[in-house]
Amino acid sequence: MERLASAVPRGPFGTGLLCFLSAGGHPSWGQERFMPSFVYVARESGSGREIRNTIDASTEQAAISSLLNKNLLVVSIQEKVGKKGKTGGGTVSLQDLVVFTRQLATMLEAGLAMVQSLQALAEQTTNKAMRDAIKDVTARVEGGDSFSEALVKHPKVFNKLYVCMVGAGERGGMLAEILARLATYLENTARLRKKVKSAMMYPVGVTVVALGITVFLLVKVVPVFGEIYSGFGSKLPGPTQTLIDFSAWLQKWIYMIAPAVGMAIYAWFMWIKTPKGLEFWDKYRIRIPMFGHIAHKICLARFARTLSSMVRSGVPILEVLTIVANTCGNVIMEKAIKTASADIERGEGMAQSIQKHPIFPSMVVRMMTAGEQTGKVDQMLERVADFYDEEVETILSGLTSLIEPLLIVFLGTTVGGIAVCMFLPIFKMSELVSK
């Protein structure tokens, strides 16, 4: 038990899981059954009065049987909780999914039953949407569905990749091992996403602050100096006069410029959500200097890691490629994978079909070729994913170090330039007074 307790991952579920294991897997709250609710319309057999209400039951048939035992004739009945994957609202973060997957894998490896494990995790999670989803999955598993069939009902929480890997684990009798691999995959994905966000947060924040300071100086500070200098009755230096004129123009049109810029940004983001706009953006964003290089490597790392995880889990290759195409994060790469999938279906090798598309570098093709020749495609792809992850981290570290001084220079030049332009007439005060 001490060895098992030391192996329990720490996190939002950690304390509860440790208590669950130390109590022998039978805590008092572990016996509660989470059942879905059904909305029904029924009539009393004697009076014929119509009744509309809800009832909790493990399955729809059990709900109907319970109503019949109460002398109610069911007119219509429909499941309320978990219908079509809906939960009680809110979103589920990647970190919540990572913790749930890792904890479930640990509990199954410890020999706990699936229903007991799900009940424990449902009690421990603090995310309402995640808790509702787990409760509904628990009820469906108790009702006779397999774990993967229950997960399908919640596509917003458990995507197709997740469901397919769980299904493969169930078919192969190694669900705990597959969940552990899936947790590792999600952890790597979350780590890379976090590093990209943290690397971009600083330059974006400094840029926004710099633009805000510049606009404030132009709209509020420069006009004050303009009023002071207007009483001199003398021609101002060129830079000062240009800045005052620009400030006056900005004051006049800022109430139209700000909404126009906001609408343009909104229109851009809405357009790139359309199929045509998304294809245009995905085609050209990987060509942007520096940032496009990072985006391309992130897509390649995601492609290689997803493909490796699913091949290792025993999912059929054509199904794997379909899922990988939908999760790679780039429309151009998605089309290339789907075309390669059609070539593989006709009998070509994976590396040979991927080689036809220039979006995949030669290193990826060579590693896949070596993997096919040695029967270790999953290991080769895992190495490719690790290589690109390390490259992205290295580039991001260097980019952050480079952007910091550039932003400082930009901010200093902008604010300093405005200050020099405003104080330039004061430096030439004697000449202005003599005139």
Image (cartoon, helix red, strand yellow):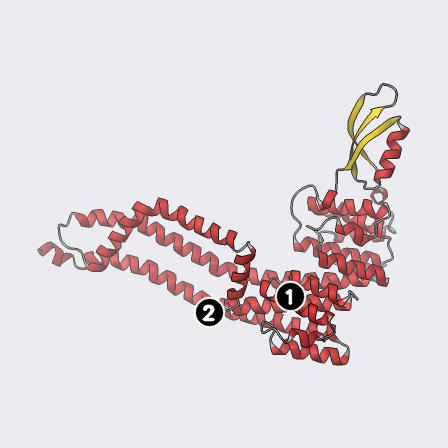
Residue picked out by circle 1: 302
Residue at the left extreme, as displayed: 434
> SS at mark 2?
helix
Expressed as whole percent of the image width and height from the top left, the position of residue 309 reads: 73, 66
Residue picked out by circle 2: 402
- Which residue occupies the foreground of this view, 250 or 180? 250
Expressed as whole percent of the image width and height from the top left, the position of residue 179 reads: 77, 60
Q: Which mark is residue 378?
A: none
Residue 178 visible somewhere in the drawing: yes
- Which residue occupies the foreground of this view, 151 or 104? 151
Type of amino acid under label 1: Arg
At 61% from the left edge and 78% from the top edge, which residue is drawn?
362
At 86% from the left edge and 43% from the top edge, which residue is drawn?
31
Instruction: Check disc 1: other Cα within 10 Å, few if <14, some if 14-19, many if 20+.
Output: many
Instruction: Check disc 2: other Cα within 10 Å, few if <14, some if 14-19, many if 20+.
Output: few
Residue 397 visible somewhere in the drawing: no
Are discs 2 and 1 less than 8 Å apart at CB?
no
Between the residue at mark 2 and the residue at mark 1, the CA separation in whole angstroms equals 26 Å
Q: Of marks 2 and 1, which one's residue comes earlier in the chain?
A: 1
- Which residue occupies the foreground of this view, 188 or 123? 188
Expressed as whole percent of the image width and height from the top left, the position of residue 70 reads: 88, 27
**Residue 312 lies in what quarter of the image?**
bottom right
Type of amino acid under label 2: Leu
At 75% from the left edge and 64% from the top edge, which residue is drawn?
181
